[in-house]
Amino acid sequence: MRADIITIGDEILIGQVIDTNSAWLATELNKVGFSVRQITSITDTPEHITNAVEDSMKESDLVIVTGGLGPTNDDRTKQTLAKLFNTTIALHKPTLDTIKTFLDGRKMPLNSNNFGQALQPVGAVILENTEGTAPGILFERDNTIVVSMPGVPHEMKAITTNKVIPFIKNKFNTVPIINRTVLTQGIAEAVLAETLEEWEESIPDYISLAYLPKPGMVRLRLSARGDSSPYINAEIEMLIDKLYSIIPDAIFGQEDDSLQSVIGEILAKKGLAIATAESCTGGRIASFITQIPGASKYFKGTVVAYSNEIKENILKVKKSTIDNNGAVSEPVVREMIKGICDIMDTDIAIATSGIAGPDGGTPDKPVGTTWIAIGNKNIQIVRCFCFGSDREKNMIRATQTALNMLRIFLEKSDCNYR
Amino acid sequence: MRADIITIGDEILIGQVIDTNSAWLATELNKVGFSVRQITSITDTPEHITNAVEDSMKESDLVIVTGGLGPTNDDRTKQTLAKLFNTTIALHKPTLDTIKTFLDGRKMPLNSNNFGQALQPVGAVILENTEGTAPGILFERDNTIVVSMPGVPHEMKAITTNKVIPFIKNKFNTVPIINRTVLTQGIAEAVLAETLEEWEESIPDYISLAYLPKPGMVRLRLSARGDSSPYINAEIEMLIDKLYSIIPDAIFGQEDDSLQSVIGEILAKKGLAIATAESCTGGRIASFITQIPGASKYFKGTVVAYSNEIKENILKVKKSTIDNNGAVSEPVVREMIKGICDIMDTDIAIATSGIAGPDGGTPDKPVGTTWIAIGNKNIQIVRCFCFGSDREKNMIRATQTALNMLRIFLEKSDCNYR
């Protein structure tokens, strides 16, 4: 089963609003077996609305239109759709009652705009809106369904969940689409593709693979329809198992995991306390770790030592170590680890020192050079990376890389740290 | 002049990724006088790509296609467009050189996937990508331009800014749309709209106003076409001046300013050093401050004191102060300010302590309660805020609010801090 989504209104076309409704709708439609063929944002002229809806009706079984049903005059969707389905507009008594009840609850009077919202296309199915004054409208022609809903996200979501999804589940005999996502860190997309070439060739043709890069990570998504093979779930599971055996260190989680959530779970389970000593990452590692609710169970704190003075006075990095090696060096991140574990009394720590850019690079240590250490007073794992020339990206990559180094260390070591 | 934007790739259609590229592109195209007619997200089948591009070419002068140019096998855009424009693919030597230089900088070898990216449609204009390995491609037919770019946001943005915008400005004779944006912090959108009602009524009808809320700030944008009045720039300037007189403390900058860039300039100019002592913001204030290149001139460092132990041992907050008032309290943030200025030897500091949520709230101090202090050993400005129930949003609001308090303090005080 195929669906199209059409979004009406200028605010998306002038870049003022980012269309988050469509991603939400696509996810919900996927769950009940619809694949979304096309998402279109259009202006609110009757001609553009008519053309877009007619084009989509030719290609898909379900067309969902959002926006253009508000109480103000620039909304022409309802009239245009009524004309397209050869019907007229008339008072819809149940809608008027719902609007009255809704406004009463907010102690607001009924005005003429609201009354206009109770006028609905004759013969259409009217979908009650418990969250606002404009109901959804459902039309049907030749087994194709067109649903129109207001664009306000919580109203659209309520109508979809309560009315649209039950209707289409009942109407169409659908098979859900299965999506599984594996999250990797530390291997660039092109290298990953080369490494996985053989594995990729082993994927049966009814399962599709997509590479989805994001700053500091690449996500691998396997998709299939539930009816493509009786063993589909088992087959995807086997492919993922194989993947773990090819790139064990790079995979840090699946689906909605993040490095900080995965690390949080391990630290909480092992009862370990962590701190960070950050130079070039400027507090980003701490802010990633503290995104997780309950991080205070394992995260004690951070020293951002942006100046050498702070590295020396607070983290107790020796002046001679900095003088002899520079602040961006292996000995310095080792001493930062020892210092932060000491003053924050933690089992483990992360330390970073690098040249984020755009200035400060030298031929020996170009912009992007970053030393990262993981460990404690007894043991430190230290690595040097060459990221790129973009300051913000270098900081995010250093953060993700450090968190992944920590994850690997926590998973492999026996945790007798102190 | 009209433009269409087409986004290729499953990740948007299955709801995994929200399309932020199109909003950015629409804004940039507006600036040079293009209005966006339609934004379409489609699957990566050759048929769908061909149909969508052909449909858009009938309606618009410029068609921008993003996505589907990555190094992996799920990308078919380039081949499809070459066919649509009746040309073939061949090695494009300058692209190969750019890719080699790009990979050399990252100490990565050239692989066959990268080599494939150097194959380009013959006769098309190849737009160099300084941020990645897939260049942009520009086709022209009957005065209509079709541009294809990778979907990775920073690569797409670099190619658009450096290559596409200059090309279309040169090619089409457009009247730019004038956009001026004023940035405010600390007043909620609805309250701001009420405060500015009279000012809003004084705006002439050829200048339009938009409220653009973002976490922790509201942007006010005034727009007009360059040909709508000969005095357009002067009129907008007058409106902005008036705005400053109505809400002086709330306005922290214009256009691409950020609180951290504005503060950075003031601190550098006044020769002041700053540090932060963060509890509930978990390092976010430090990471905002360090986004600015050259922040090391004025930013010394941070202690994230997530546990009370760190507040006491490192920031020297008295145990009795915490015991008597709780960690989320005015006396604690005052002592955090004194402690951090002392150990980091700075002129000024920011301190935060709050309940970010979702847990940890009490009837007295519900989730969202946040104490923020600005100052040094001699003087502290302290305020308490009640943000909302969302953890991440509370952290961002606390960060923006703290930075704006600092800005107002720096602009108003005489800077004899110590």
Image: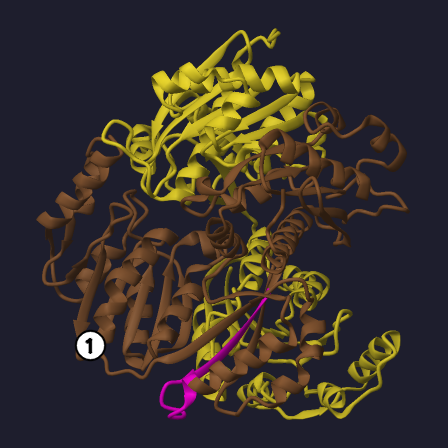
Chain colours: A yellow, B brown
Residue occupying the point 48% across, 90% down: B206
Q: In front here: B105 or A137?
A: B105
| Residue B228 included in the magenta stretch of the image | yes
Q: Residues within 10 Å of mark 1 (few under 14, many from 20)?
A: few
What count of labels does the image hold?
1
Q: Is residue A170 visible?
A: yes
Quadrant of the snapshot with the C terminus of chain A: top right
Give the residue number, with chain letter if any, for mark 1.
B171
Q: In front here: B271 or A334?
A: B271
Residue B299 vs residue B158: left or right? right
Q: In front here: B296 or A402?
A: B296
Q: Quadrant of residue A26?
A: bottom right
**Amino acid type shown at disc 1:** Lys
Disc 1 element = helix
Classify A20 as above or below A369: below
- Please provide percent x and percent y for residue B131: 29, 48
| Residue B183 included in the magenta stretch of the image | no
- Please provide percent x and percent y for residue B110: 19, 34
Chain for numbered disc 1: B
Residue occupying the point 39% across, 80% down: B177
- Please provide percent x and percent y for residue A33: 56, 53
Q: Quadrant of residue A70?
A: bottom right
Q: Which residues are magenta?
A: B218-233
